[in-house]
Amino acid sequence: MNAETSWEEMTCRDDVPKVANYVEITVPQYLPDDFKTFFRRTMGTFERVLERMSTDDQLRRRIATGGREQVPLDKDLLMTLWIQKSVPDRQTDSQTDRHTERKP
């Protein structure tokens, strides 16, 4: 980045490198343990949640009238789980702390 780089150029979403068809091709090839490691859920649980979300009237996608194309629900849910995975689980951490503080 040089001094002539504009803010718009630095923050442009189109400049982010993406792996084409990652969700469509790569994710279905994950072994069950790998899927659970990456998303903290089994593939079966993910599919059940996705099914419930896709049939819920309040969670259904709206018909877009402009702007960027909407992210498909399965990709959106996988992104949410991926981000959630990166946030420390405070409940688990506090339970671990309490467990280690106990004396036999």
Image (cartoon, grey):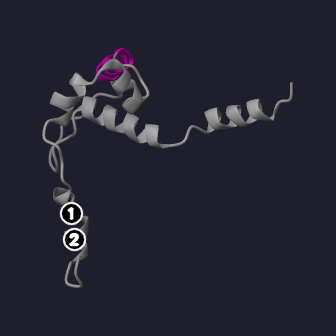
Compared to residue 68, the image places residue 33 above or below, namely above
Asked if residue 54 is among those painted magenta in the image, a careful observer would answer: yes
Left or right: 39 as drawn, with respect to 66: right
Magenta-highlighted residues: 44-56
Q: Position of residue 52 (x, y in %)?
A: 35, 18
Q: Quadrant of residue 6?
A: bottom left
Q: Position of residue 11 (x, y in %)?
A: 25, 65
Residue found at x 34% / y 29%: 59
Does the rendering let one see residue 61?
Answer: no
Asked whether the residues under the numbered discs 1 and 2 touch, taking CB atoms below 8 Å apart as contact, a structural biologist would say yes
Q: Position of residue 91 (x, y in %)?
A: 64, 34
Q: How many marks?
A: 2
Q: Position of residue 67 (x, y in %)?
A: 16, 51
Majority SS type along the magenta span = helix
Residue found at x 72% / y 37%: 97
Local secondary structure at mark 2: helix
Q: Is the residue marked by circle 1 packed among few (<14), some (14-19), or many (20+) residues within 10 Å?
A: few
Left or right: 98 as drawn, with respect to 47: right
Compared to residue 63, the image places residue 49 above or below, namely above
Amino acid marked by disc 2: Glu
Q: Which residue is mark 2?
A: 8
Compared to residue 7, the image places residue 101 above or below, namely above
Q: How far apart in space, not on screen, are marks 1 and 2 (Cα)? A: 6 Å
Q: Quadrant of residue 65?
A: top left
Instruction: Pick whichever, 20 or 31, lies toward us.
Output: 31
Say which mark, if any, is on residue 12.
Answer: 1
Local secondary structure at mark 1: loop
Left or right: 54 as drawn, with respect to 25: right
Instruction: Pick whichever, 21 or 30, lies toward us.
Output: 30
